[in-house]
Image (spheres, grey):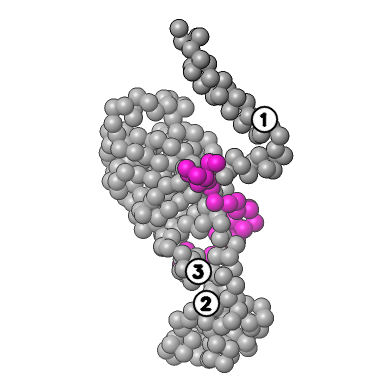
Amino acid sequence: HPATDPKRQFGLSTMLSSTFRRAFMTASLTPAKSAGLSTARRTLAQGPAAGGHISDELLEKLGSLSTQALVDGLWVMGWPSAQIDGARPLHPSHRCVGRAVTLNFVPARPDIAQDKPAGGESPEYEAFEKCGPKEVLVMSSVGPWESVGGDIKFLRLKQREIGGLVTDGSVRDTDEIINYGFPCFSYSTTARQGPAAMQPWECNGVVSVSGVTVRPGDAIVGDQDGVVVVPAKVAEKVYSIAHGREQIEEIVKEELMKNPGPPGKFYPFMSGKIKVDSPLGQLLASKGITPENSNQFEGSADW
C-alpha cells in the first residue's frame, strides 16, 4: 500500500524536510539578504524588466533636448541604435517625453484569445491604468499596418492625460485621436481592426519596437524627427553628453552666423575627442567651456 511503502515515505519525508529547510533559511535571512537571494534566483532564468528609475527632474531635462542630441549621446557611448524608426508623429505639433509603460502584442490564435484575461482585466487596460502625464505608452505591434487601437479605447488615454503613445503599428480613427490632444507616434494609420491579427498579451515586459529594445521605465522622447529610447540605467550620462553637445552646436552656429563660412572648421566633432588647441577648442575656451567643466574634450570623457 502506498501509505506504508518505506521508499514512498522516505521520499515524502525528504521532500517535506527540504521544503521546510528552504523556508527556514529564507526566514532567517535579513530583509536585504533575502531580497538579494530572491533577485539572484530570478535572474538565473530572466532578468528584471526595468533597468532603473528616472526622476521627474531628469525626465524634464531629457525632454528639453532634441532627439538628435540624445541619439548622438548614445552613439558616443557605443550603445546600439535607439531611434524607433517606425514611429512618426500623427500631427506636426506632437512632442512627448515620459517613462515607458510597455504593452506587447502577439499574433492572434484561438487559445491566446481564450486565455487572455477578458474585459477590463486585459493587459492593454492594465497598461492604460499605469499611464499618466509622465508616462508614455509603448505598444509593440506584430506588424506595421496592424491597428493597436482607436477612438473608444484611446478615450481612456485622454482621460488619463497620458504623456504620449508610441507604436510601430498603426492607429485608427485618426481625427478623433488628434482631437484627444495627447501626442501620438505611429507607423501609419489604418481602418483595420486589430483583434483579427493580434492580441495584447503582456504589460510592462521588455519589448522590441521596430527592432529597438524598450524596458519599462526607460525615457521615451519624441519630436518631429522621431522617437528615441533612453535606457534608464544610463539616462543621467546620456543627458550629460547630449546637453554638452547641444551647447557646443549652439556656439558653433552662433559663430558661423556672425562669420559666415564653411562649417568644417568646427563641425562635425566627436564628444570626448575635442583638442584644446583646435579651432573648435579655442572657440569654446572663449565662451568659458574647457576640460575643467566639460566632458567633451580629449581626456575629459567620463563614460
Q: Residue at x 28, y 31 (%)?
A: 109
From the viewer's perspective, is residue 4 above or below residue 104? above
Which residues are the magenta region?
A: 41-69
Disc number at residue 271?
2
Q: Earlier in the sequence, mark 1 or mark 3?
A: 1
Q: Position of residue 252 (x, y in %)?
A: 52, 83
Does 209 appear in magenta? no
Does 48 appear in magenta? yes
| Left or right, residue 85 beside residue 287 | left
Q: Amino acid at mark 3?
A: Met
Circle 3 sits on which residue? 77
Q: Work out whether residue 233 or residue 165 is closer to the camera in this orientation and state it.
A: 233
Q: Amino acid at mark 2?
A: Ser
Q: Earlier in the sequence, mark 2 or mark 1?
A: 1
Quadrant holding the C terminus: bottom right
Disc 2 to disc 1, C-alpha distance: 54 Å
